[in-house]
Image (cartoon, helix red, strand yellow):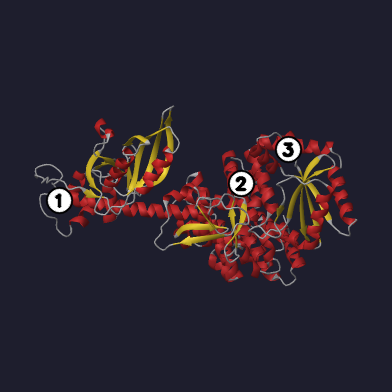
């Protein structure tokens, strides 16, 4: 453990203007507050915050951050209060300590909820001051270094999983790669001990068998560059065990089949020398296709800059090489933390725009699981670079679509997306964006997010926004449909309701409000009789005679198929068909045509008469069309459909023989009469042998 004077001297060495008195007060305060508390390994507890502070001095962080590290467990684990911290060390330190403290107070019980709730608090806290994240990462790193002292295996594995899934990716996203690598290695050792042991032994064998190969390759690179007047610092190493294991798993190969276990880093004076070095390396050794990445011209979102390439070295080894300037190397070593060295905080905000995206995801997610799902997406995926028409650079995960691009710009733009142009050409919204594409989003204020977008968007921000909209729309429409059922129930009561009947019914059913009652009716959580009894005690059965007038068909106009109700796929009803609804608990109302064969099978569900309503929007009709097997038949069928104003949305060859081909079609139509006209036109054509509705 660092002694008091050692810790203070470390800070003063890189920041002579640091508040020495405050650092000394913090050391003493922490030691006194933690008192006789012990860690799992038997050390005094206050040794932990001191070691966390020591880790942060290696990053040359400002005095407030170091003091926060020293005090970060005092509010949580001792009798110290926020007011005491604020009085003794100032408001800024108190807020930082409080931010770190909030991350430890986890109320959820299940493991997945625990990780999600921790991440939720983490993101909210660090969005206020990114130094909270820096302290927490150092705290987690020291805890991982002492993980083996925890006696319970299940607790060790939970901490290791949480580290692998949340803390290591967060360290990577802010450019703290050394933190990330050590966390991954320590977590990997706990989670996959046999794999860790096996890879570690093979790395040792490789190192001993290759002698000084890394030194020879490094020396050769230095000599190559020196001949051209480039002074370079070259270091080499084997990749860390978790990185090797992940590549083995991703590529489904053995350790012996891995060809790029060694990585080398070349640090030169400036950007010009970076590109000169790259050219010399590629002239000397063959480049591995597809492995070159230029993070200087297009930096990573965390500000990381470097040139990456892989070559086949003359020692019959494929090696990875990173080329960067001295400034880039300093940034790469400690990432975003470099902006807090010597209290130079101004540029830190430019590096954490992704945090704002994650916080917006928090606002859109309804459950802890959704938080974890969407934020993992935002943290893990590889990136591509695309541009707006004005030249603004947008980073997205690989496979992202124009919808993801729109949501990355602004949530409202994503919600209102109706189309997109990529490099000046109109493309489907599900089209993957490629590196360097220019994307223009076409919008309309009348547009709303579509549930179908969930099948192709890739970013957590887009998925969270769409899912939230769909859930709210589903509830609104379910409430609207329930209200229609409610009105039909009211008509069957023996007397008119008073003005307070609905409110009294809600109370009797122990529901929060009238909307909850309507939703319960639509989802058949309550029977009609239970609702009638709540509205008018005695009307649900017993001695009271209930009036049962002829039921009126309930209109589904204004509701969205697939939300409050769904159209049956067995009969594919369209506007104009007489329809009936099937109600089951916890399910959307299923709409069938009245002559659907499925209804004859005694379906176990309540029936309700439905109507489309005047001026209903169109629907999708399914047809089976048999055409003659001769040239021009398919064209004739398509021409007829076009002339009748029917849009083909799906066409599949169902059966073929020597004389005829049978096609199944899905058509956008206005209503039942429109379908009948289409069928009549098809049947009148010479090329068509038969046309029927499926």
Mark 2 to mark 1 CA distance (whole Å): 60 Å
Crowding near pointer 3: few (<14 within 10 Å), some, many (20+)? few
Determine which residue is flagged by label 3: 258
Q: As drawn, is 260 to the left or to the right of 625?
A: right
Q: Quadrant of the C terminus?
A: top left
In the image, 25 versus 426, the foreground residue is 426
Identity of the residue drawn at 17% across and 48% down? 552
Q: Nearer the viewer, mark 2 or mark 3?
A: 3
In the image, 202 versus 650, the foreground residue is 650
Q: As drawn, is 170 to the left or to the right of 201?
A: left
Mark 3 to mark 1 CA distance (whole Å): 75 Å
- Residue 97 at what x, y percent from top left? 58, 62
Q: Residue furthest top?
A: 658
Q: Quadrant of the N terminus?
A: bottom right
Q: As drawn, is 457 to the left or to the right of 382?
A: left
Determine which residue is flagged by label 2: 164
The image shows residue 255, relative to residue 34, as above or below, that is: above
Q: Residue furthest bottom?
A: 17
């Amino acid at each position: 453990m660092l002694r008091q004077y050692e810790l203070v001297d470390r800070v003063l060495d890189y920041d002579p203007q640091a508040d020495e008195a405050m650092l000394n007060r913090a050391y003493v305060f922490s030691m006194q507050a933690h008192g006789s508390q012990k860690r799992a390994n038997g050390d005094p507890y206050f040794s932990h915050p001191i070691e966390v502070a020591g880790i942060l001095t290696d990053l040359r962080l400002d005095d407030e951050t170091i003091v926060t590290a020293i005090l970060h467990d005092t509010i949580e684990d001792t009798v110290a209060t926020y007011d005491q911290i604020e009085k003794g060390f100032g408001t800024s330190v108190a807020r930082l300590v409080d931010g770190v403290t909030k991350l430890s107070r986890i109320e959820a019980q299940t493991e997945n909820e625990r990780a999600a709730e921790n991440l939720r608090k983490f993101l909210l806290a660090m969005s206020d001051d990114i130094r909270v994240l820096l302290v927490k990462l150092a705290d987690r790193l020291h805890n991982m270094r002492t993980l083996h002292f925890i006696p319970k295996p299940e607790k060790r594995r939970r901490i290791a999983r949480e580290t692998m899934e949340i803390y290591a990716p967060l360290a990577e996203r802010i450019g703290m790669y050394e933190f990330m690598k050590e966390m991954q290695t320590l977590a990997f050792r706990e989670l996959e001990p046999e794999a860790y042991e096996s890879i570690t032994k093979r790395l040792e064998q490789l190192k001993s068998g290759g002698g000084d190969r890394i030194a020879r390759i490094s020396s050769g690179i230095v000599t190559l560059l020196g001949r051209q007047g480039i002074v370079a610092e070259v270091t080499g190493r084997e990749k860390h065990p978790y990185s090797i294991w992940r590549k083995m798993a991703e590529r489904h190969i053995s350790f012996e089949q891995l060809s790029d276990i060694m990585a080398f880093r070349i640090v030169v004076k400036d950007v010009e020398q970076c590109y000169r070095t790259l050219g010399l390396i590629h002239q000397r050794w063959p480049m591995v296709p597809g492995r070159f990445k230029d993070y200087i011209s297009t930096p990573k979102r965390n500000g990381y800059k470097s040139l990456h390439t892989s070559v086949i070295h003359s020692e019959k080894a494929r090696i990875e090489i990173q080329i960067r300037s001295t400034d880039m190397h300093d940034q790469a070593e400690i990432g975003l933390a470099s902006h807090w060295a010597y209290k130079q905080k101004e540029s830190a905000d430019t590096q954490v725009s992704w945090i704002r995206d994650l916080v917006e995801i928090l606002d859109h997610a309804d459950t802890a699981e959704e938080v974890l799902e969407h934020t993992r997406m935002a943290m893990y995926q590889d990136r591509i670079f695309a541009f707006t028409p004005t030249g603004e650079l947008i980073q997205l995960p690989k496979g992202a679509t124009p919808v993801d691009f729109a949501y990355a710009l602004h949530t409202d733009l994503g919600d209102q997306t109706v189309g997109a142009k990529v490099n000046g050409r109109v493309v489907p919204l599900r089209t993957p964006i490629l590196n360097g594409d220019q994307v223009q989003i076409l919008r309309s204020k009348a547009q709303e997010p579509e549930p179908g977008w969930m099948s192709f968007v890739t970013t957590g921000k887009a998925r969270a926004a769409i899912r939230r909209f769909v859930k709210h729309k589903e509830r609104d429409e379910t409430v609207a449909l329930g209200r229609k059922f409610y009105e039909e129930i009211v008509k069957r009561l023996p007397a008119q309701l008073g003005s307070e009947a609905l409110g009294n019914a809600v109370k009797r059913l122990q529901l929060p409000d009238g909307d909850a009652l309507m939703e319960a009716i639509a989802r058949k959580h309550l029977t009609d009789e239970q609702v009638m009894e709540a509205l008018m005690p005695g009307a649900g059965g017993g001695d009271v005679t209930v009036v049962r007038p002829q039921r009126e068909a309930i209109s589904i106009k204004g509701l969205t198929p697939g939300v409050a109700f769904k159209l049956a796929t067995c009969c594919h009803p369209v506007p104009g068909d007489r329809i009936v609804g099937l109600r089951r608990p916890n399910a959307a109302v299923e709409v069938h045509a009245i002559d659907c064969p499925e209804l004859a099978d005694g379906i176990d569900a309540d029936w309700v008469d439905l109507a489309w309503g005047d001026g209903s929007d169109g629907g999708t009709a399914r047809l089976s069309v048999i055409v003659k097997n001769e040239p021009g038949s398919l064209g004739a069928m398509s021409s007829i459909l076009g002339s009748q104003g029917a849009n083909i949305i799906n066409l599949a060859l169902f059966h073929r023989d020597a004389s005829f081909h049978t096609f199944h079609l899905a058509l956008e139509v206005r209503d039942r009469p429109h379908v009948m006209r289409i069928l009549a036109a098809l049947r009148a054509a010479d090329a068509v042998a038969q046309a029927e509705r499926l």
